[in-house]
Amino acid sequence: MKQPRRQIWTANRRKLALGILGVAAAGIFSRAIYLQVVDTEFLQGQGDERFLRTVEVPAHRGMITDRNGEPLAVSSPVDSLWVHPPTLLANQERLPELARMLGMNVADLETKVLARKDKEFMYLRRAMEPDAAARVMALGIQGVFKQREYRRYYPAAEVTAHLLGFTDIDDAGQEGIELAYNAVLQGRPGEKRVIKDRYGRTVEDVESVREPQPGQTVTLSIDRRIQYLAYRALKAAVLEYHAASAAAVVLDPTTGEVLAMVNQPSSNPNNRAEIRSDLLRNRTVTDVYEPGSTMKPFTIAMALESGKYRPDTPINTAPGTLSVGRYTVRDTHNYGLLDVFRVITKSSNVGTTKIALSLPAESLWKTFRAVGFGRPTGVGFPGEQGGWLAHFSRWSTIGHANQSFGYGISVTPLQLARAYGALASGGILRPVSLVKLDQAPAGERVFPAEVIRQLLPMMESVISAQGTAQRAAVTGYRVAGKTGTVHKIVGRGYAKNNYFAVFAGFAPASNPRLVMVVIVDDPRGKSYYGGLVAAPVFAKVMSGALRILNVPPDNVSNPKTTNVKPVVAAAPRGAR
């Protein structure tokens, strides 16, 4: 009996389908055998693409040390916590436990994670102490991970804050030396390939692609011992006189190296919450001041070099005032007849003005320009200012007079210290450096040696009983320097009762080893003169620094006095 045609068609269809499935199965089986036995690299590659990652290996930031190798900035290892938001949200019931361990509000943590629920990565807490991070990881919360990073630490804290600057959360330099030498300090991160699981956790290191290159050490010219001395003395003066701010620089005139650079006010860069740009501004290089009478030695040096004046050349300063056009130049007292020597001793504005106006304005301008005023020192510190020195062609007669005793010109403390370094080194101007030098630069002669030989006794007389800076004296050492008491500019004129108290000097005068400039901004009270406010800071620092450096005394025979030309005129009531 024949089968119906429909049944035959159904049977053939079934055989066809089974045949197709059999061929497909045979093909899949053959392909599997091929991939597993012959072409194993394909499956391995596909797996690696899903779990093999290239990750960055952080490089250790280089140290900053002082000239003696003492650490000023180091990078210590820390751990940063991060999360995989989708995984953490899948274990949302553990958020309160995590928040409590981190000292966070649960709602804030949940909001933060939810905002990045579609992301693969979110920092939870940066730069934690390793022990604290380990305690969080011990909770075993899925989706929470840690990674090794580095955090900058400053052993001297606020004492070096203005000089060193600070780094950001990623350990990159933001201010000061950290910024200026960031490329040297930062180093180069490495790379490695790792296998991660589906939660993003590293389960195996596969290979190193590139080894991290640690940053280099930067050795500064700073002597940490002198830095501490200067900082303490400056801070004490600011507190005693309720000053707005202050700055000081100590340098070695034989090399141009900066041994100390301090400022007030300050803050601790180890506490990121305290970091404020106004507290960490390095006033020694970024702020400019009218230097006042500290400029007079350069005016007198110009006069001596001209050949028109000698130390004993008489200058009549009576009656203590001098009319210059519609303006009047004044002394604090009527000193009468002075010689050039005592013009410096008494800090006579009238005497200095008469000398300056008797010589071409161009000569004074060239002298100031030669010692570095009106241009940056080139020390390489971020934000360094060049000050202001107008071209002599723009000076009026009163402008010429004002320039001679330090008004109408602005300088940074570092510029002033460098210029005094030229006086201390016998007329040689050297570049200044914030890094330790292997050898002293040759420098450039800006004054004849004979001019400096005549000028130094005048500057020593400033520290004598007849001078304006008796409080700058250092027992056992001869000191040379000059005071300045400068009216501050307020609006378009000068304030009547607001001053900068300034002292610049060096010691020992017989063979200068240290130069120091001190500027105190707006000391309050009756004591605001440079000789009363800034000079004692100089004396405290210089006394300690000379002994730290084992500089032999040069005034042992009479340690409490300075050997200068005797002066018979009465001392002024107030220092200038």
Image (cartoon, grey):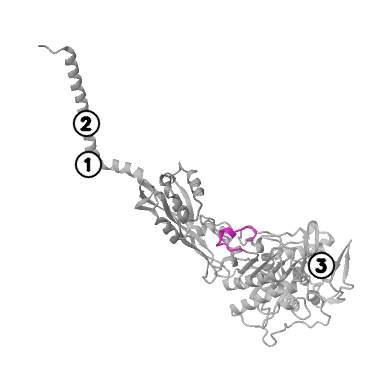
The answer to whether any part of residue 213 appears in the image is no
The answer to whether marks 1 and 2 mark residues whose Cβ atoms lie closer than 8 Å is no
Question: Helix, strand or loop at disc 3?
Answer: helix
Q: Distance between the residues labelled 1 and 3?
A: 98 Å
Mark found first going from the N terminus, 1 or 2: 2
Label 3 Cα crowd, 10 Å radius (few <14 / some 14-19 / many 20+): many
Does residue 25 appear to the left or right of 268 in the view shown? left
Which residue is painted at 67% across and 59% down in the image? Answer: 385
Magenta residues span 267-279
Q: Mark 1 points at which residue?
A: 37
In this view, the residue farthest toward the left is 1
Question: Helix, strand or loop at disc 1?
Answer: helix
Q: Residue 418, how many percent across, how many down?
A: 67, 67
Asked whether 234 falls inside the magenta stretch, the response is: no
Q: Residue 431, how many percent across, how many down?
A: 63, 65
The residue type indicated by label 2 comes to Ala
Tag nearer the camera, 1 or 2: 2
Towards the viewer: 231 or 366: 231
**Which numbered dot is residue 356?**
3
Q: Name the residue under label 2.
A: 25
